Image: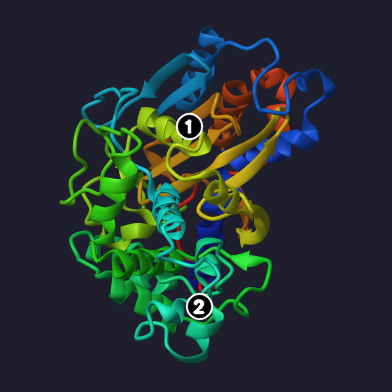
Amino acid sequence: MTSLRFRTVLSTVGRAGRLALATGMGAVLAAATLTAPAAARTASATGTSQDGGLDRQALRKTLDAVHEAGMYGIYSQVRDQGQTWQGASGVADVDTRRPVRPDMVHRVGSITKTFVSVAILQQVARGAIDLDAPIGRYLPDLVPGDRGQRITVRMLLNHTSHIGDYIAPAFPSLLEGSGKSLDDNRFRTFTPKELAGLGLAAAPTGEPGATPGSYSNTNYILAGLLLEKVTGTDAERYVTRNVIRKAGLRHTSFPRTPVIPGPHSKAYESLYGLIDPPRDYSVYNMSWGGTAGAIVSTMDDLNRFYRALLRGELVGAAQLAEMQKTVPVLAGGGLIDYGLGIYSVDAPCGRFWGHSGGVFGMSTESLSSPDGNRQLSYGVNRTKYQQIDENGQIVPSPIDYAIGAHGLLALCGTTPAQARTSQLPLIPLPLDVPPATIK
C-alpha cells in the first residue's frame, strides 16, 4: 500500500472515530426519517409501533440477513413493553465455528460514558459537584490555569470542552497507517492520569464551550478522575456500586483482567483492510478505555440499564432532564444531538435515547424510547470491515444495510421494504477512536 493510501485510510479512520456516534443505528434511523415513504410512518411519537408487539419471525430473518451479508456474529435483544425477543446469528469463532449466543458478554465501548455520566449526576444531586463549575476547581493540578477555569464539568460530559482525544498519541502507529500499536498495547496498562495527559497535550479542537462540540474520549477519563476526587473512591468501583448494582445488572462490569468474563465471542478487527485477515482482539487490557470505554455487558443488561435510567430509577427527574439537554457535537463530519453521556436519535417512529460504542473488534448500539418501553441493543464481533474508495470515503457494505433493516424493524416495526434500505448509506459503529487529530 502506498504512503498516499496510508494517509487516505488514516484520514478515514480519524473520521471513523467520530462516526462511532454519528453513524451506527442512530444515523441509519435518522437517514430513514428522510427516505422512508408515508407507508412506513406508522408509529407514535414515543417510538413504538401503533399496533404494538414484536414480529419475531421477521426479527429473526433480519438478524440472519446481517450474518449472511458478511458479519461474523451478531446478537440482539428487542423489547416492547412486556414482550422480549432475543436472538443471535453467526459464529463467535471463525476457526471453530462456535455459534454466537444472545446472552454473550460483550465489550460495549463508549456506552461506558452513560454509566459514568449517571455517577456524576448522582454527585450533582448530592451537591458534591456543580455541573457549571470549572473543572479546575476539582482537578487544579491536572487542568491548571486559564484552561481549568474555562472548561466546566458540563463541557466534559457533552463534549464541548474541545480537549483533544488521547487515542492517537496512545496508538501512534495509526498515524503511520499501521495497526502495530494495537498489538504493542495489548497487555499495556495505561493510568487515567496518563491518558488525560495525552489528551490535554493534544491540540484543542476549539474554544471551551463552543458549539458544535467535538467528541473526545479524554473528557470521560477526566470525568472518572473527577468522580474519584469527590468520592474518595476509585471511579470504576464507584460506578460498579452505585450505578451497575443499583440498576440490578448481573453481567456488567469493568473487567479486572484482559479476558472478557463469562461466555463471549472473539473480536475481529480489520482496520479498513490494514489488518487482513481480521485479527482477534478479544483478549486486551482495556485500561486504554477506562471510564471512557472499558465496560462489558450483555444486551439484556443494556436494555435494563437504559430502561431504569429513562424511568428515573438511577437519577432524579432534574438530573435526567440535565442529561437530556443536547447540543450539536461533531462526530464523523456530521452533527449529533448529544446530552450528558447520552444522545438522541429521531427515527420514523419517534425519538430514541442511547449510545453506541466500539473497541477493537466489537461494536454495540443501545437505543430506547423515552418511556423505556421500546428498546434495541445489539452487538457485533467484526469491525471496520468496509472498504475505502479512491477519495478516502468509506464505502457502505451490505452488512450496513442489513443492520439498518434489523434496527428499523426492531424499533419501529417497519419492514425493510417500507424503509427502502437500499437508500440508507450510513455505516454502523466504527471504533470510538482518533478524532480530528488524525489527518
Q: Nearer the viewer, residue 286 or 50?
A: 50
Query: Which residue is under mark 2?
Result: 134
Q: Tell me: residue 415, above or below residue 218.
A: above
Q: Position of residue 69 (x, y in %)?
A: 50, 28
Residue at horizontal 46%, vertical 76%? 135
Gap in angstroms between the C-alphas marked 2 and 1: 31 Å
Indicate the secondary structure of the residue bearing disc 2.
loop
Indicate which disc, 2 or 1, sits on the residue closer to the N terminus.
2
Residue 209 spot, x, y in % from top left: 63, 73
Residue 174: x %, y % from top left: 41, 68
Q: In the figure, residue 208 lies in which quadrant?
A: bottom right
**Numbered badge on residue 307:** 1
Q: Residue 177 or 430: which is nearer the viewer?
A: 430
Query: Given the current orientation, which residue lies at the most extreme bottom position?
Result: 145
Identify whether 272 is placed above or below 411: below
**Would residue 369 appear left or right of 257 to someone viewing this image?**
right
Question: Quadrant location of residue 162?
Answer: bottom right
Which residue is located at x 42 percent, y 18 percent?
86
| Position of the C terminus by quadrant | bottom right
